[in-house]
Image (cartoon, rainbow, N blue to C red):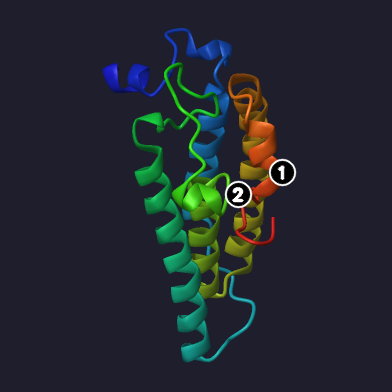
Amino acid sequence: MNKLQEWGFSKDWWRNQRGEFWVLGQTVLSIGFILLPVVQIVHLPFAVRLGLTLGLGLMGLGLGMAGVFHLGNNLTPLPHPKEESQLVTTGVYAWVRHPIYSSVIFLALAYSVWHMSLSHGLGAIALFIFFDRKAAQEEQWLSAKFKDYPTYRQSVKKLIPLFY
């Protein structure tokens, strides 16, 4: 219970004042993704599949690990920033505003490509849409807390480095 409060969860979490429902939705969606049946759509040569999977997977792992590292004590699963948090715009946050969300998306895509699974590809799209919406809520709170956030937001991509 202490760790949840350290991460910013409130004692009355059911009021969703800090975005607790987003964390619940993320958990349900992630478990759902894992439980999806593999529905193969096409067969790619092993080398192509391996290359795409490794590329997407390494991108996902790199973004996630760098995001956690650079956030440090600011880390929370909630979209609401911690009270004592600082705005992080360096390191991986100079490339993408939400690298941990990006990480989950890239890893889901890697899994989808490895299995060439239509169901998991659709699941990865669902994760992308979900994290795009969660990030939008988070950015409202970040803009209210940090006066420099709107400028940062205009200069750095949201979820996909160099693209979106």
Q: CA distance from mark 1 to mark 2?
A: 23 Å
Residue 74 rendering spot, x and y as whole percentages: 40, 30
Name the quadrant of the N terminus: top left
- Residue at the farthest top position: 12
Decide which of 155, 125 is in the foreground and name it.
155
Q: Is residue 6 visible?
A: yes
Q: Is residue 86 left or right of residue 136?
A: left
User: Quadrant of residue 116 in the image?
Assistant: bottom right
Q: Secondary structure at mark 1?
A: helix
Q: Which residue is mark 2?
A: 127
**Who's the residue at 35% across and 45% down the image?**
69
Q: Which residue is mark 1?
A: 154
Of labels 1 and 2, earlier in sequence is: 2
Q: Quadrant of the C terminus?
A: bottom right
- Relative to 18, residue 123 above or below: below
Is residue 32 among what the camera can see?
Answer: no
Q: Relative to the observer, which residue lies in front, 142 or 53?
A: 142
Residue at 58% from the left image edge and 62% from the top image edge: 120
> Horizontally, is 138 left or right of 8 in the view?
right
Q: Nearer the viewer, mark 1 or mark 2?
A: 1
Q: Amino acid at mark 1?
A: Gln
